[in-house]
Amino acid sequence: LPKETTSQLSLTSAELGHFNYDLRLQALPAGETKAMQFKCALGSLQTLRFRFLNFLRKPETYKVALSSKVDGAPIDFECDPSVNAPAAEGSNGIEVAVDLTFEPSSMKGSDALLTISSAEGGEYTCEVRGEALPPRPQGPIAIKAGASANVNFKNVFAAAADFAFVCE
């Protein structure tokens, strides 16, 4: 965790004697905010993985939260509300992954901030940007004469909408 503490270091040498040093130790934040870029057609979804390091020597559960960078704007991203991190075996930490899914709900871009935090493990942030591409046609769906077929689709918009279908 970002904090400051003090400690003592004692060095002893048979030839030079005994030396005591007061140390002032300062832990800095996790570093710069990372960024992830998504590009996905309207009506589709894309999943990417965010990775961070857990340095705790015990298992830890991190809280995962998404917040909109623009007040009132919809968040077109989804992820699990928490992630379990195994204990780190050394000072290099252990890599932990969080899956983040982007499903655009409009042709506008979507910006959010991913925050992964723990009281003991610290906080990691990532700026996420989603770009919606035009919807892609689906098919072909073969329909035999006199038969029927199901066309599965999902309304990704925030409100109810009417859809028109075209077939040849």
Image: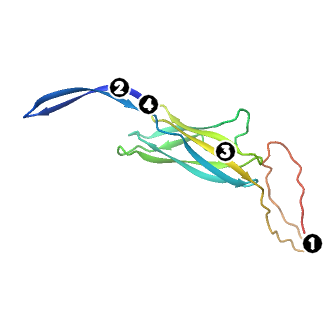
Task: Say which mark, if any, is on residue 2.
Answer: 4
Q: Amino acid at mark 3?
A: Phe
Q: Nearer the viewer, residue 33 or 51?
A: 33
- Counting from the top left corner in percent of width and height, residue 118 is at 50, 34
Tag nearer the camera, 4 or 3: 4
Pointer 3 or 2: first along the chain: 2
Examine the image and state in which quarter residue 73 appears. Answer: top right
Quarter of the picture containing the C terminus is bottom right
Return the residue at label 2. Answer: 5
- Counting from the top left corner in percent of width and height, residue 115 is at 57, 37
Label 3: element kind: strand
Q: Residue furthest left?
A: 15
Kindly indicate whether the residue at mark 3 contacts the one at mark 4 (C-beta within 8 angstroms).
no
Kindly indicate whether the residue at mark 2 contacts the one at mark 1 (C-beta within 8 angstroms).
no
Q: Amino acid at mark 4?
A: Pro
Pointer 1 or 2: first along the chain: 2
Return the residue at label 1. Answer: 146
Q: How far, Cα to Cα, is label 3 from label 2?
A: 39 Å
Q: How far, Cα to Cα, is label 1 from label 4?
A: 70 Å
Label 4: element kind: loop
Quarter of the picture containing the N terminus is top left
